[in-house]
Amino acid sequence: GRAAGLLVLAAATVGAAAAQDAGAFARIAMGARSAAFPAQVADRSGYASPFLNPALAPFQPAQGVELSSGALAFDRSLETVQVAAPLKPRSGIAAGVVHGGVDNIDGRDASGYPTDGQNEDGTLRTDEYAFFATFGTQLSERVSGGVGLRLYRNELFEGVRAPTAIGIALGTSVRLSQRLSAGLAVDDLFARYEWSSSGSQLASVTDYFPTRIRGGLAYAGGAVGERPRFTVAAEAELAIQPSEAIRPSGLSVLGTSVASRDTTLEVRLAGVTGRVGGEFWVTDGFAVRGGLDRIGAGEVGELRPSAGFGIEQRVGELDLRVDYAVVVEPFGSALMHLATVRLGL
């Protein structure tokens, strides 16, 4: 039926490229700082979100809330909310939600006829959410570890039951010297969507999240106020994508009927990419940032350069920080703008 056809089309589109794997919206950025400075798995400065590595939760300077919003091309949207706090003397926690969506989708069934949409003009929209909670603690003076839980929900359209997925995140951070630190994180262990549609025909698809293993180094030097004057970092990512493939294995004859026999195989695809970034505090309250993501993803056009800045100011009893980032999407297709406001208590 119409619902089944749209489900199959959506599943095929999702699997067409690595950038479109399940949960891709939650891997764009966690706030404007991580968009402008994309290599933060080893950043122990206190500014990196524990969403990126749960082991960074103990290094937050104070409790606070972050609100982020992105302006993206092609009717896409991205918003994040994070509440985080240190747990003295050695631990920290963070929780929040990431929302991604696409609006003004022209829905068509298998025959090419328009579908009924959620919007007043008949178009469709999708909404996807990632709810997360992380906890990290310092295991020693040099080593910290953390664990995170993620709950994903994808609201595609009314003909498809909104699937949920649960993923586990693990992380560790090691201070190698006074200025150099290392980090390792594993994201979305065991996460997958189980799709099913309603209608005259029933279609079901399993959509696996890529398991990402990220490791990197961060070097912090100089001093301005109580923070490093500059931080430079690099990280590599190994993405392992489970999938299923059907291989014809013969024919079965039952009376006058002939049916094909199929064998389902589990396939694992792996890809390695890299990212680098840096941050420089010009004054105690103003920083500039830059970075390069998707190194080694394929053609040169797939690189994703970024730049941004941060402003920090004390307002009464609150620490106010405003971050901004602009990112060139692959092949120069569009510019992505993100802004974050953080209130520290």
Image (cartoon, rainbow, N blue to C red):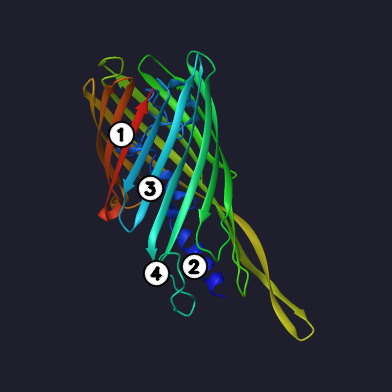
Q: CA distance from mark 3 to mark 4?
A: 20 Å
Disc 3 target residue = 78
Q: CA distance from mark 1 to mark 3?
A: 22 Å
Q: Quadrant of the N terminus?
A: bottom right
How crowded pointer 4 is (Cα within 10 Å; few <14, some 14-19, many 20+) is rated as some
Under mark 2, the amino acid is Leu
Under mark 4, the amino acid is Asp
Above or below residue 276? Residue 43 is above
Q: Look at the numbered discs 4 and 2 and tell me whether their residues touch, using CB distance below 8 Å.
A: no
Q: Residue furthest bottom?
A: 256
The residue lying toward the viewer, choosing from 233 and 328, is: 328
User: Which-is-in-front pick, marks 2 and 1?
Assistant: 2
Mark 3: which secondary structure? strand
Q: Earlier in the sequence, mark 2 or mark 1?
A: 2
Examine the rendering and report whether any part of residue 13 can be seen.
Answer: yes
Above or below residue 144? Residue 310 is below
Disc 1 target residue = 277
